[in-house]
Image (cartoon, helix red, strand yellow):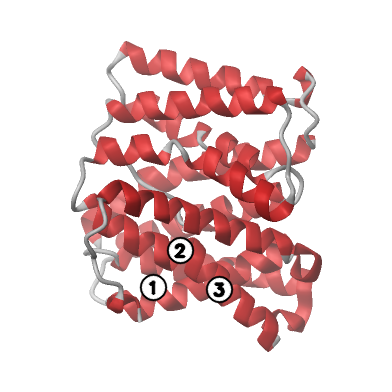
Amino acid sequence: MLKSIPPGRLPAPTLVLGSMVSTQLGSAIAKSLFNQVGPLGMVSLRVGLAAILLILWQRPRWRGHTALDYRLLVAFGLSLAVMNGCFYAAIARIPIGVAVALEFSGPLLVSLLYSRRWLDGLWVGLAAIGVVLLSPLQGASLDSLGVVLALLGGVAWGFYIILSAWVGRVFQGGEGLALAMAVGGLLLLPLGLATTGPTLFSPSLLGLGLAVALLASALPYSLEMVALRRMPVHGFGVLLSLEPAIASVISWLGLGETLTLQMMVAIGLIMMAAAGVSLGQPQVVSRQE
């Protein structure tokens, strides 16, 4: 099914924007279902069904790897599960656009750790100001636990980026992501069942979960693969920095989520920092959420 998606003749930036719109539509739909299935139930459905789609597409080799390779794969899957679980738990409490912006703290810190440019320190400092502005201590009308969960999701995203580079050296193409998604799905499934029960597998919820998996993982991953073949990775990273704004607009249109001026300024600072760091970085890794 996914192989039928043609590269098309759309410009690469359009594909990246389409990927982000698809991802955030998936997040908005997922959040709208929290009253039926809860964030942990929804994320277990999303990751599990996305794993099935990616395995059918990539057809990864399960055997022929060392014990160290499998441990690395489990760690990668764990980072993916924590990243997605924290994000879904966060957006149950705070606006999606705010959660997406806060999550960027993880990749920015990774960039700082690997950077030899003093300018990157300034960009990360700018992002830190944005994070502080989103803190309830600074008067932002946000749920404290939601902010903490989004930041934890950002930390997991940072580990995801580091582990993704290692996994990419061991597993070919998209095999590593497909297998890690399966690991993440298995880790999240008990949490989903504990909070939702057997209704998690009702046909209606499975159908909606499949739609979220397609929008939030399968389609964005397909579009990004095509786009990255046709544009510099730093350009991809700059475009990716627009994601908090796209998330904010989609959640406002679809869910009626509104942001205060302070929140918008904070998100803008984090977006500027993400774009600035991306201009000097050789590698960009998108998330699967």
Residue nearest the observer in this picture, 221 or 162:
221
Q: Is residue 180 visible?
A: no
Which of discs 2 and 3 lies nearer the camera? The answer is 3
Q: Is residue 18 left or right of residue 269?
A: left
Q: Position of residue 114 (x, y in %)?
A: 32, 27
- The residue drawn where x is 77% and y is 78% is 197
Q: Is residue 97 left or right of residue 172?
A: right
Q: Is residue 71 visible?
A: yes
Find residue 63 and report its image quarter: bottom left
Disc 1 on helix, strand or loop? helix
Residue nearest the observer in this picture, 106 or 171:
106
Label 3 to label 1, Cα distance in Å? 14 Å
- The residue drawn where x is 67% and y is 88% is 203
Q: Which mark identifies residue 54?
A: 1
Label 2 to label 3, Cα distance in Å? 10 Å
Disc 2 on helix, strand or loop? helix
Which of discs 2 and 1 lies nearer the camera? The answer is 2
Labels 2 and 3: the sequence-earlier one: 3
On screen, residue 169 above or below 136: below
What is the three-letter code of the residue carrying label 3?
Ala
The residue carrying pointer 3 sits among few (fewer than 14), some (14 to 19) or many (20 or more) residues within 10 Å by Cα, namely some
Residue contact at pointers 3 and 1, CB within 8 angstroms? no
The residue carrying pointer 2 sits among few (fewer than 14), some (14 to 19) or many (20 or more) residues within 10 Å by Cα, namely many
Q: Which mark identifies residue 217?
A: 2
Query: Circle 3 is placed at which residue position?
Result: 211
What is the three-letter code of the residue carrying label 1?
Leu
